[in-house]
Image: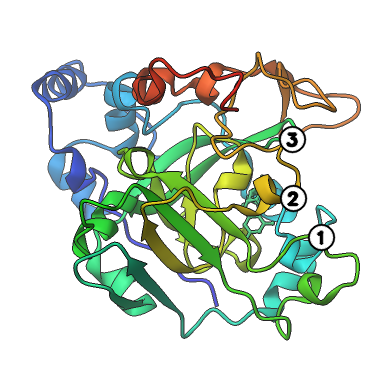
Amino acid sequence: MRRKLFVPPIPSSEITPESVYLNRRSFMQAGVAFAASGIGMGANSAASGVTAMEYRKASKSSNGFYTDEDLTPAKDMSSYGNFYEFGTGKADPASYAHEMSVDPWTVEVVGEVGKPGKLHLEDIMSGFDLEERIYRLRCVEAWSMVVPWIGFPLSDLLARFEPTSKAKYVEFRTLHDPKQMRGTRSFTSIIDWPYREGLRMDEAMSPLTLLSVGMYGNTLPNQNGAPIRLVVPWKYGFKSIKSIVQIRLTNKKPKTSWETLAPREYGFYANVNPSVDHPRWSQASERRLPSTLFKPNRIPTLPFNGYEEQVGELYAGMDLKKYY
Ligand code: MTE
């Protein structure tokens, strides 16, 4: 059962640089009325005199948390995707992910942490300040979407477990249960399950890196990675691992699923980069969904998926053609 999620209109993590405050005041003085398109637009926003939309407009360019591009309709987002645990077809996740049970659910955090432990889904839903982020998602296959996620920064969760000074990387694992995941018991299955992904510690701590528990105002549909998934908007979509059950901090670069499978095609970094093509296709442009034969909606791809201002520094001095 999917549930509505309440998210305060102004995320607590963003209280409030002066420039934004001034902008917000000038919106109000000008008496500009914005349509409240988002979620959690109840009494709170009326009381504070500012809607999430106003706030987004005031702050969108600086922190990268929002974009005012058209959202991909929820039905397109949840009916077309990749979740190989349920098959390799684009519609397989929507057809079969309901066979996975997501409640109860626990995420264990282990490795280079002072306080290893487990979080139950209830602890996660009640223990972190949820916020809405509108991000572009760019798949390595050259399609893209714009999605209103609900979640909280990965750094908030990691801090609770007290990373040690040896923690240089974070490895993530998806649930692996062949009984519930028909794609993992198929003889054509190519991945060495469980699905694994990883980030460098500084990437994991970026304010853009989100653990998502919802989208479009509700909890996540199973096919989109319920009950909790990663969203790393400046990297190709395969880094945004779904249905996470384990987070391990390590001092060694983790072996990730796609890099292990085809290292020349899928690198560990996987930063969106229009000037480094995939060996079998160009990465210079993308199909923004919804896209049809007659209206392909092809747009240029941006370096770091448009988040260079926020994350470019993490890669200063690195040869991005070598570390793709
Ligand atoms: N996570 C798991 N566990 N298994 C997968 O097959 N596919 C990845 C990523 N996370 C995948 C996964 C890929 S290739 C993409 S593009 C995104 O999920 C797609 O996310 P979406 O289906 O929610 O749009």
Query: In the rendered image, is residue 87 in sight?
Result: yes
Mark 1 to mark 2 CA distance (whole Å): 8 Å
Name the residue at 72% across, 67% down: 85
| Residue contact at pointers 1 and 2, CB within 8 angstroms | yes
Q: Which amino acid lies under the numbered mark 1 shown in the image of this protein?
A: Ile
Please state the horizontal and vertical placement of residue 187, each as a whole percent of the image. Answer: 90, 71
- Foreground residue, 166 or 60? 166
Q: Secondary structure at mark 2?
A: helix
**On the image, numbered disc 2 is attached to which residue?**
261
Query: In the rendered image, is residue 4 in sight?
Result: no
Residue 136 figure quarter? top right
Residue 54 figure quarter? top left
**On the image, numbered disc 1 is attached to which residue?**
190
**On the image, numbered disc 3 is attached to which residue?**
265
Q: Residues within 10 Å of mark 2 (few under 14, many from 20)?
A: few
Q: Secondary structure at mark 1?
A: loop
